[in-house]
Image: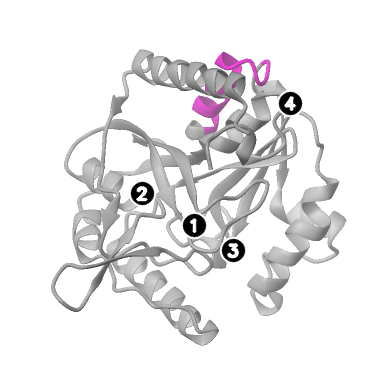
Amino acid sequence: MTNTQNLIERARILRELRAFFDDCDYIEVETPVIVQPPAMELHIDAIPTGLKRDGSVADFLRTSPELHMKRLLAAGLNRIYQIGPCFRHGERGDRHNPEFTMLEWYESGGDYRSVLDITTELLTTLGAIENLQSVTIFTVADAFLEHAGWDPRIAATFDADRFNEDLVDKVEPALPQQGAVVLLDYPAPLAALARLSERDPRVAERWELYLNGVELANAYSELTDPDEQRRRFEQWGRERAERGAEVYPLDEAFLIALADMPAAGGIAIGIDRLVMALLPDASSIGDVRML
C-alpha cells in the first residue's frame, strides 16, 4: 500500500527543490518525453513507444532529458533545470523502476567542481548534510586500489564489466554508509558525455554521489566537441552490437548543436532515491512513489 505520508513529504521536497533553483536564478524547462533517437549509452536501454515517426524508425521514451537540455544551452540559455519522468528498460528493484523521476540541471561556464558546490548547497538546504566538509571524497582510482586491488586508469587492463562488478561487490559496500560520499574522476572509457581531464587524460571529469548508502547522482564537466562526441557514440554503438543490444541512430540534431554549446557542468539526480535517502522509513522506491 502506498505510504501517503511519504507522498506528502515527497511533495514538500519537490517544492523546496524548485524554490532553491528559483532563488539561484535557474530557469525551469520542459523537453520532450517521447524522443527519437535516445542517447547511445552502453548499459542503458530505452523503451520503445510502439509508434513510428516516419514509418520505419521508432520513437522511444526518454532515458534522460540530457541531450535536449544541452541543445537549450547551445541556443543561449545559461542556467536550466528540469524535474520530470524518465524511463529505462529492464530496471526493477528496491532502488530501480522502469519509470522514475529525474532532476537534471546545467550551468554554462561551470564544470564538475562547480556542480559539486551547488549540489552541496542543495543538500544543505534540504537538511541532508551540514556543508561541504560533510562530504567525503574519494577518487575512483584510490577506492579501487584499496578495495578491489587494481587501478582502472590503466587502459591495458581496463574492463568495463569487471569495473561494474567490482564497484557493486567490493567498492560500494566499503564506502561510508552514512552521510554524503563522492567518487571522483571516473576512467576515461566510462565517459560517454563527459570531458576528459587535462591534468590526467586517463580519467573523465565525472563524479557520482552516494547519500546514506544510496547511489544518487551522476555529474560531469560536459563534453562540447562534436567530433569526439560522435566518435564516442559510434564506439558505444559497436560495443552494444557486440553485446546483442539495439544500436540506436545518432542524434544528429544534438551533434550539430554541440558545436555551439559553451563549456558547462551538469548533473542528474534520481528524485525517488533522493526522497528515500531523506526519509527514515523509506527502504524502496515503492515507499516514495506510486508504482
Which residue position is annotated with label 2?
A: 66
Viewed as shown, does residue 3 lie left or right of 45? right
Q: Residue 109 falls in which quadrant of the image?
A: top left
Q: What amino acid is at disc 4?
A: Asp
Give the total number of marks visible in the rendering.
4
Which residue position is annotated with label 1?
A: 196
Q: Mark 4 touching mark 1, by CB under 8 A?
A: no
Q: What amino acid is at disc 2?
A: Glu
> Which class describes the residues within 10 Å of circle 4: few (<14), some (14-19), or many (20+)?
few
Which residue position is annotated with label 4?
A: 281
Magenta-tinted stretch: 116-130
Viewed as shown, does residue 260 lie left or right of 183? left
> Which class describes the residues within 10 Å of circle 3: few (<14), some (14-19), or many (20+)?
some
> Which class describes the residues within 10 Å of circle 1: few (<14), some (14-19), or many (20+)?
many
Q: Secondary structure at mark 1?
A: loop
Which label lies toward us, 2 or 1? 2
Q: What amino acid is at disc 3?
A: Arg
Instruction: Indicate the position of residue 162 as horizontal and vertical percent values.
Output: 72, 71
